[in-house]
Image (tube, rainbow, N blue to C red):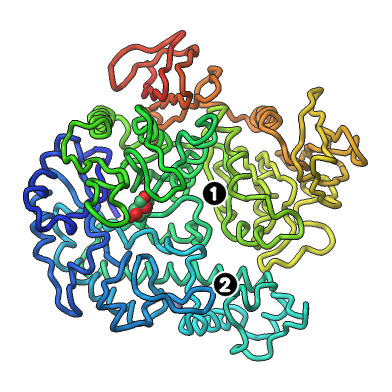
Amino acid sequence: MGEIREENVLLYGADYNPEQWLSYPEILEEDIRLMKLAKVNTVSLGIFSWAVLEPEEGNYNLDYMEEIINRLYKNGISVNLATPTGAMPNWLTHTYPEVLQTAENGIRNIPGKRHNFCYTSPIMREKMGKMNRKLSERFGKHPGVIMWHISNEYGGNFRDASCHCELCQEAFREWLKEKYQTLDKLNQAWWTAFWSHTYTDWSQIHSPMPHGEDALHGQNLDWRRFVSYKLQEFCREEIKAIRVFSDKPVTANMMRYFEPLDYDRWKDDLDVISWDSYPDWHTMEDEVPIAVWAAFMHNQMRSFKKMPFILMESTPSLVNWKQENNVKRPGMNYLSSMQAVAHGADGVMYFQWRKSRGSFEKFHGAVVGHDGTEHTRVFKEVKQIGEDFTKISEKVIGTCNSSKVALIMDWENWWAFKDAAGISKSINYEEELQKYYRGFWELGIETDVISMDHDLSSYKLVVAPLLYLYKPGYAEKVEDFVKNGGTYLATYWSGQVNETDLCFLGKKPLEEMLGIFIEEIDVGNEYFTNDADYQGKTYPLGVLRELVNPQGAEVRGTYLKDYVAGMPVITKNAYGKGYAYYLAAQPDRELLIDLYKELCETAGVTANIPDVLPYGVTVSKRSDRDGKKEIYFLQNFNRQPVEMTLRDFYRDIVTGKDVNGCIKLDTYECLILEKQ
Ligand code: GLA
Ligand code: ZN
């Protein structure tokens, strides 16, 4: 689909909502001056503009938008133009109530808020199609429009993003018919003989609801697949309408650890990946877990297509929807923006350009506050980032992170995992994944985050934490990967169920490759603690612990206490040209880091730089295909300066200064370096 824009610059800008300011023409003029001052080169426009673009049904009003796009363009500011389905105008919801979602209590919503349309409704699809075609016809070839921002945070308003209306129920049944063909097959796949829940007619099937059926795990899993698929189908329809007149790249802004939508499938419909990041900076004892939270997501975004992504929304100061909303302390906006670039972003955008005067987001952070000037701490930091972006753009564009390590994170596993309630309700897949990613972050090792569907052949080391569900073909793919020389780590609570959430019978899929027999899992507590011995060192273990019997595998670590004393915690099995490791119990941070050192040595994986990183410091590396460009981002997330020693000679590409030997990294400093 071509480049996002012709000039080689990192995108820099914000969500821009001029609709709120149409009766303040002096403010719209001033916006341009301030944008140029802050080095803004792109804005996301029209995200919530439906009510202005189509004030009454069929009466379109696109002139004001043309004027704004022209003015921005003349001033060197490009537009990422949105389709406005993120929020529905009142005439639409009042005239056609079927466009409103029905919640899981079975009650249809009343008009209001946003991100709450029924994605199955033919009327919603028709009205969206007309609007999108109008926008595309009018602006699809405008040189100032560089990209399409399809809707906004699909599914963002509801806990599970799903609509339970009659149209959706019927569509679910149709989807199931196509998938299973016969009720008999469906009953088998869902294990409906349990509690006498056998279906004898398709019309008996409903979406899972708290006051109805929610005990059939296979059904829950299929419903989640259906919801993600149906919303994706809606997104596809939006893109189709845009494509009538425009072939500019499309993106849809994704969200953090957003469980309802299988973004790994969505990625295929989008030309550019983007996401909205709002980490909880400054809310913990140290920033490392928060930095890891964001870094993990950035890595997932760049891994989807193995290409740079855009940080579509971030706040320059605070948000307004958390329990307590603290501002980003001085330096943190700089560091977190550079962090995104360090992990593969080719653009950093804010929510929002200017603070609303009223309504829900009037105190949400923005580049320009109610004072309307450039004289604020926030504006100055935003401007500084804009200036530094212009200095690093040329070096950074055309590069991305390339990784020999992959961490598996899969939505279907996530969904099934939630239902595995028999083990522990307090185990959280996202948090567990972050712990596993954190080890690599601390060691400064590039790590992709991929689903079970991805090709593994470009990696040397694959880590698959808590992969409870194996999709068809996954185990065979892993066996091939290891046979061909790869190193693989599986952990406790893996390979228990198949794609319809039925437990595997007999040997579990990867047991042979791992050289073990997995017998049972326990959830310990404070009265029954355990430790591991791993290569002569003792480590406390978490609560999830499995009883595993070696069957050919070498035992690298053992339990130290209780009835499992002496049994394996870590095993290693030679398989073909590679090695398969198993970790039978929840590790602490140190055990994981030490284990990663062994895994990396076995796999031949090296860190981005050869030096020891102080706690809270990480380094990311972006390079181009032929290895001519290599950019290092040395990031200090500590609340105080730290010192470290760099063995190699680097040049700071922002200041032009030489960097080598013992260096000091200031609080929240990010150095952007190239080798000399
Ligand atoms: C989301 C939305 C934005 C805005 C921000 C506030 O990301 O997409 O429209 O509401 O949250 O943080
Ligand atoms: Zn519906």
Quadrant where the C terminus is found in the figure: top left
Task: Decide: is 55 above or below 646.
Answer: below
Percent across and percent down for residue 663 are 43, 11
- The residue labelled by disc 2 is 223
Determine whether the beta carbon of the residue marked 1 sits less than 8 angstroms from the nearest atom of ligand 1: no
Q: Residue furthest top?
A: 661
Is 517 situated left or right of 68 in this image? right
Task: Decide: is 351 above or below 224.
Answer: above
What's the residue type where badge 1 is placed? Ile
User: Residue visible at 43% across and 59% down?
Assistant: 268
Percent across and percent down for residue 226 are 53, 72
Observer able to see residue 380: yes
Task: Decide: is 343 above or below 86.
Answer: above
What's the residue type where badge 2 is placed? Trp
Q: Which circle's residue, 1 or 2, is located before the other in the chain?
A: 2
- The residue labelled by disc 1 is 450
